[in-house]
Amino acid sequence: MSETPGNIAGDVGRNESDLPADWPQIARILDANANRAEEGLRVLEDCFRFGRDDPFLAGQLKQLRHALSEALEFLPRQDCLLARDSHGDVGRAIVARGEYERDSLGGIIEANIRRVQQSLRSLEEYSKPVSVEAASRIEKLRYQSYDLHQALFRSQHVAKRLLASRLHVIIDAANSDLELQQQIEKLAAARIDMIQLRDKQLDDRLLIHRAGVIRRTLDRLQAAQPGIPLLVINDRPDVARASSADGVHVGQDDMAVAQARKIVGFHAIVGVSTHSIEQARQAVLDGADYLGCGPTFPGQTKQFDAYPGPAFLEQVSAEIRLPAFAIGGITLENLDEVLETGMQRVAVAGAISNSDAADDVAGEFQDRLLVASSWQEK
């Protein structure tokens, strides 16, 4: 007989001989772990809803909590409740070291996502003698919790490296080492936060060499000018790794985030281009460190068949808290239209790199982005 909610072991009318002989003990274990898992998910949801103001991750946690409630319907919850013996629980007298120590919201998040995962594993195992359907559903939720754990962690820790980054400039490899070196010096002096090297014309050897020129120039500048730009390489995690760049930026048709991380390392930055809110949501769950969102307007360096435009930026601003950069044809002339969407970060190419006064243009970008960021945080 197939299992459906309300047609399960322990319900009224079900033969008690179908239950395991040690059912009272199993019911007690299921009850305790169902409570732990649901409580842990509620703590996490509250943290991302009220503490982090993160609509997307709060929504993911809420969906996981509701999916768990549906899976638990395949268990005899009434029996589990009747088997509860809180006063007789020997574990109440056992206090683990550090159990009451929480130094921040981050500590609460980490403790509760691990509590959820441990509880799901226990629920999965102890459901098997009673409901295969419940055990199967809970197993899937456990694996979902692992992916969500990574997204929660990156939203709290890894993404902090990018929180102060507002201006991302995309450049090519220039015509010579000297020209590239001089360009990087100007960009660093202009308070650029991130440089992305994108050049589809060079062979691998020269591309790696030019990326190395940028890396060495930035390292030299670091001694006299703290806060030099981060360096990411477009599309090529192998070049990023070989040149000791800070990370890589991949597109929707390029290598997946997980594959890129295997090459650049777990602590490197991985950014992802997104062209729809669905892609932006998936990039968060895939473990991206930042998003490139667009194209916003037609630009000089790259042409597209369609432009999601400011409407897409509004969706991302309303829902996603991972650092996100508006990209595509952005200039000082249309920057206000971008800022009106709630976006506080932009990625530009020709507007700065092709300017004869790159430092002045970059300075105006930074000033206006800073004002917008300060205003939106109030």
Image (cartoon, rainbow, N blue to C red):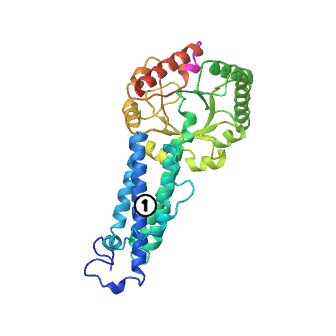
Tell me the residue at 70%/28% (across/down): 214
Tell me the residue at 48%/53% (across/down): 112
The amino acid type found where label 1 is placed reads Arg
Indicate the position of residue 279 as horizontal and vertical percent values.
Answer: 44, 44
Magenta-span inclusion, residue 355: yes
Question: In this picture, is 114 found above or below 254?
Answer: below
Q: Quadrant of the N terminus?
A: bottom left
Q: Nearer the viewer, residue 202 or 245?
A: 245
Q: Quadrant of residue 230?
A: top right
Q: Nearer the viewer, residue 83 or 59?
A: 83
Magenta-span inclusion, residue 295: no
User: Is residue 5 toward the left or the right of residue 253 in the image?
Assistant: left
Label 1: how many Cα within 10 Å (few below 14, some 14–19, many 20+): some
Question: In this picture, is 119 found above or below 276?
Answer: below
**Mark 1 element type:** helix
Q: Quadrant of residue 35?
A: bottom left
Q: Which residue is mark 1?
A: 36
Indicate the position of residue 290 as horizontal and vertical percent values.
Answer: 52, 38
Tell me the residue at 56%/13% (across/down): 360
Question: In this picture, is 71 found above or below 39?
Answer: below
Q: Quadrant of the C terminus?
A: top left
Q: Is residue 276 visible?
A: no
Indicate the position of residue 235 as horizontal and vertical percent values.
Answer: 60, 40
Question: In this picture, is 277 found above or below 65?
Answer: above
Give the residues in magenta. Answer: 352-358
Q: Is residue 12 visible?
A: yes
Tell me the residue at 42%/28% (across/down): 377
